[in-house]
């Protein structure tokens, strides 16, 4: 019985220690070592290139009230833009935004189709200002125009942990800001194998990285982009976790006690059978 008790103790202790959630597994900004990878200094941030399906909010400023009313559907620049940048109701998008169609164009009043796929919002701004300036010069009393272009409904998605779709409310968002938006990662979600799914020019790429490494801030994984999908998986085998030494000892002691109790019941039954029904009878 003592031999069995020792075996049970060792097995349960090993299980408890394996299940222990340590600071090493969950802390960020750790120095790279044999377990936490080093990332080369590949940090780069490029302005987002427009893609098919994006929606643009375009506001034309002019001293000519007729021009302003014609291109802005009577809307006020500040309030409409603020609502849309914060993820306002999609029903209002059709009135104030321009959808990039399957050919990469937007259909702009008086100009018609304009190819914008692969351009930045600044490039679209300059393109529209040039087109409008050329067009409006033919109108008596011509007044120069300025154009504001923003992407609306910019978001990223998370699956696996705190699944959902989250709005990007700033020009540059880091992976840490994204994790903060979802309420951080739970104790039993893997930080060493986060997958980032991104589509660029119709090609889907999957990048895997360890967010615990302090080198992440200098790497290509630091910034996220609109329409990114972040996949966070649960640590394999973790149906429950232990996050302190006292808990380890408590769980181990309880499990051993329960095992000994079950063993005693079984052994008592076996002894009873052997006593009343000896072999050979």
Image: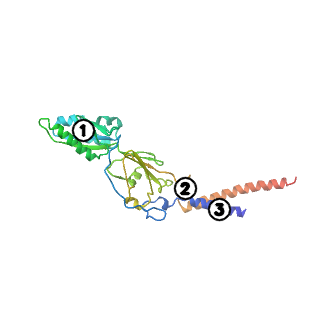
In the image, 49 versus 78, the foreground residue is 49
Mark 1 and mark 2 in contact? Answer it, CB < 8 Å: no
The kind of secondary structure element at disc 2 is loop
Q: How did the renderer colour the structure?
A: rainbow
> Which residue is painted at 32% across and 35% down in the image?
94
Q: CA distance from mark 1 to mark 2?
A: 53 Å
**N-term mark: 1 or 3:** 3
Dot label at residue 76: 1
Residue 240 location (% of width, % of height): 56, 53
Q: Check disc 2 and report the residue beneath it.
A: 241
**N-term mark: 1 or 2:** 1
Query: Are there few (<14), some (14-19), or many (20+) residues within 10 Å of tag 3?
Result: some
Residue 8 location (% of width, % of height): 66, 60
Q: Check disc 3 and report the residue beneath it.
A: 9
Q: Is residue 45 above or below residue 121?
A: below
Q: CA distance from mark 2 to mark 3?
A: 18 Å
> Which residue is painted at 52% across and 59% down in the image?
21
Q: CA distance from mark 1 to mark 3?
A: 72 Å
The kind of secondary structure element at disc 1 is loop
């Amino acid at each position: 019985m003592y031999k069995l008790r020792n075996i049970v103790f060792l097995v349960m202790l090993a299980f408890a220690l394996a299940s222990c959630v340590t600071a090493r597994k969950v802390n960020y900004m750790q120095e790279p070592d044999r377990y936490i990878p080093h990332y080369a200094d590949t940090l780069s941030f490029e302005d987002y290139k427009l893609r098919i399906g994006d929606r643009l909010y375009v506001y034309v400023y002019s001293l000519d009230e007729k021009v302003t009313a014609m291109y802005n559907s009577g809307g006020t620049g500040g309030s409409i833009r603020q609502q849309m940048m914060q993820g306002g109701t999609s029903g209002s998008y059709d009135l104030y935004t321009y959808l990039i169609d399957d050919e990469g164009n937007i259909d702009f009043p008086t100009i018609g189709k304009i190819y914008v796929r692969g351009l930045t919002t600044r490039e679209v701004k300059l393109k529209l200002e040039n087109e409008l300036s050329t067009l409006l010069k033919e109108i008596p009393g011509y007044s120069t125009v300025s154009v504001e272009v923003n992407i609306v409904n910019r978001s990223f998605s998370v699956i696996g942990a705190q699944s959902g779709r989250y709005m990007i409310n700033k020009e540059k968002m880091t992976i840490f800001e994204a994790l903060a938006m979802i309420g951080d990662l739970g104790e039993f979600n893997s930080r060493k194998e986060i997958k980032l799914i991104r589509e660029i020019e119709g090609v889907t790429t999957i990048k895997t990285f360890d967010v615990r490494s302090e080198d992440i801030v200098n790497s290509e994984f630091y910034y996220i982009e609109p329409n990114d999908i972040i996949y966070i998986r649960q640590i394999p085998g973790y149906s429950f976790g232990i996050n302190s030494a006292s808990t380890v000892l408590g769980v181990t002691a309880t499990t051993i006690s329960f095992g000994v109790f079950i063993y005693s019941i079984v052994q008592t039954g076996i002894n009873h059978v052997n006593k009343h029904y000896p072999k050979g009878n």
